[in-house]
Image: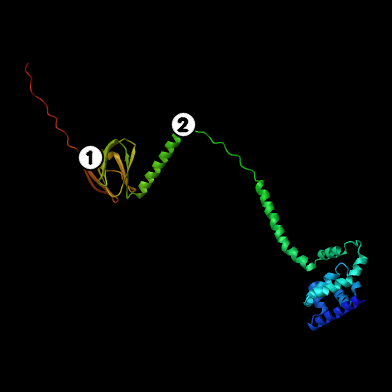
C-alpha cells in the first residue's frame, strides 16, 4: 500500500508539473503517437488499462515530454509498483526482467519506423543498382582476339614502298602549297630543257613526249629550251599553249609568279657546208 500511495503522489506531482508548463495530454499524444486514453489512464493511476508490454515505455515517453529532472527517480518508483503484476502475468518467472526489457526494445513508434524506412530505401536501391551493374559488366562477352596475320618479305617490301610513295606525294603537295611559283610542263614531243631555280638550283634534262614535269620555286625560274613549240606550260594555273614557233629555240625565258615576264626565241643558224673541189693527181 505504501508503494501505491507513493506512486499516486508521484502521479499528482507529475500532473502538477504538466499543468504548470501548460502541456496538455492531447499534444503529448499527437507528438508521441500514444493513444490519449492510455495517457489519461496513466495520470489517473489506472495502470491495469495500459498494455503491459508497453506500459513502461508509455511512462518514460510521458516523462520525456514533461522534461522532468532526474527521470530515473520516477522510473524506479514505476518499476517497483509494476513488479508484482509482471511476476503474476509472466510465463517464465525465472527471467521476468529480461522479458520486459526485450518487449521494450521491440516496441518502436511508427514515426521512428517511417523515418528509418525513408532513409533506408534509397540506400537499398543504390546498393541493388550497383550490384546489377557489376553483374552485367561481368557478363559482357569478350571479343575473341583476331589472329595476327603474318606478312611475307615481298609484302613487307611492297608496303614499305607504298608508304614511301605516299610520303613522297605528301611532301610534294606540301612543297607545292608552300611555293609561290608552281610550273607544270607537258611535252607533246621530245624537248631539251635547262632551268635555274631561284638563281641556285640548276636542272638539265630531256623531257620525253607525253611526259609531265613540275617545278616549284620561291620567286623565279630561268629557262633555256630546245623545241619549245612542243611544250605546254602552266604557271600558277595560267596556261601557255605556244612558247615559240616551230624550229625556234628559247635562249632565255624568265618565269615569276606573274607568269612569263621575259622570253627570247631565235631560229638557230644553219651551218655552211664547204665543198672540196680540189682534184687529185695520181
Q: Nearer the viewer, residue 71 or 187?
A: 71
- In the rendering, at what x and y percent does residue 120 appear? 73, 61
Disc count in the image? 2
Which residue is outermost to the left? 281
SS at circle 1: strand
Question: Considering only vertical position in the picture, is 134 above or below 101?
Answer: above
Q: How is the image coloured?
A: rainbow
Q: Is residue 228 left or right of residue 107?
A: left
Closer to the chain start, of discs 1 and 2, is 2
Q: Which residue is mark 1?
A: 249
Left/right placement of residue 18 relative to residue 167 reads right
Q: In which quadrant of the rendered image does the C terminus lie?
A: top left
For label 2, the residue is 153
Mark 1 or 2: in front is 2
**Residue at the extreme bottom:** 20
Kindly state the secondary structure of the residue where label 2 is placed: helix
Q: CA distance from mark 1 to mark 2?
A: 50 Å
Q: Based on the displayed image, in which of its 4 quarters is residue 57 positioned?
A: bottom right
Q: Nearer the viewer, residue 240 or 8?
A: 8
Q: Is residue 143 above or below residue 112?
A: above
**Around disc 1, counting alpha carbons within 10 Å, would you say few (fewer than 14), some (14 to 19), or many (20 or more)?**
many
Q: Percent from the top left, x then y, of residue 36? A: 85, 75
Which image quadrant for residue 91? bottom right
The local crowd at label 2, few if under 14, some if 14 to 19, many if 20 or more residues have their Cα within 10 Å, is few
Q: Position of residue 136 (x, y in %)?
A: 67, 49
In the depicted structure, whether residue 164 falls above or below residue 238: above
Q: Determine the image quadrant of residue 102.
A: bottom right
- Residue 30 shows in this picture: no
Would you say residue 41 is visible in this rendering? yes
Position of residue 179 measured from the top left corner of the image (x, y, whole percent): 33, 49
Amino acid at each position: 500500500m505504501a508503494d501505491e500511495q507513493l506512486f499516486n503522489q508521484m502521479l499528482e506531482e507529475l500532473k502538477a508539473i504538466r499543468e504548470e508548463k501548460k502541456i496538455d495530454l492531447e499534444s503529448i499524444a499527437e507528438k508521441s503517437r500514444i493513444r490519449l486514453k492510455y495517457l489519461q489512464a496513466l495520470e489517473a493511476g489506472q495502470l491495469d488499462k495500459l498494455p503491459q508490454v508497453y506500459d513502461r515505455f508509455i511512462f518514460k515517453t510521458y516523462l520525456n515530454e514533461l522534461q522532468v529532472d532526474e527521470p530515473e527517480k520516477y522510473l524506479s518508483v514505476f518499476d517497483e509498483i509494476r513488479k508484482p503484476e509482471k511476476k503474476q502475468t509472466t510465463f517464465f518467472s525465472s527471467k521476468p526482467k529480461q522479458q520486459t526489457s526485450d518487449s521494450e526494445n521491440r516496441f518502436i513508434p511508427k514515426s521512428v519506423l517511417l523515418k528509418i524506412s525513408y532513409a533506408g530505401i534509397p540506400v537499398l536501391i543504390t546498393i541493388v543498382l550497383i550490384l546489377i551493374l557489376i553483374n552485367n559488366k561481368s557478363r559482357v562477352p569478350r571479343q575473341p582476339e583476331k589472329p595476327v596475320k603474318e606478312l611475307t618479305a615481298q609484302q613487307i617490301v611492297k608496303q614499305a614502298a607504298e608508304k614511301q610513295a605516299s610520303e613522297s606525294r605528301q611532301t610534294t603537295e606540301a612543297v607545292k602549297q608552300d611555293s609561290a611559283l608552281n610550273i607544270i610542263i607537258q611535252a607533246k614531243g621530245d624537248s631539251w630543257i635547262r632551268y635555274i631555280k631561284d638563281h641556285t638550283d640548276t636542272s638539265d634534262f630531256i623531257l620525253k613526249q607525253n611526259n609531265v614535269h613540275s617545278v616549284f620555286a620561291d620567286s623565279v625560274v630561268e629557262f633555256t629550251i630546245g623545241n619549245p613549240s612542243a611544250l605546254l606550260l602552266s604557271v600558277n594555273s595560267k596556261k601557255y599553249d605556244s612558247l615559240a614557233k616551230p624550229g625556234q629555240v628559247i635562249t632565255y625565258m624568265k618565269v615569276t609568279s606573274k607568269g612569263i615576264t621575259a622570253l627570247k626565241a631565235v631560229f638557230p643558224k644553219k651551218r655552211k657546208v664547204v665543198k672540196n673541189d680540189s682534184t687529185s693527181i695520181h
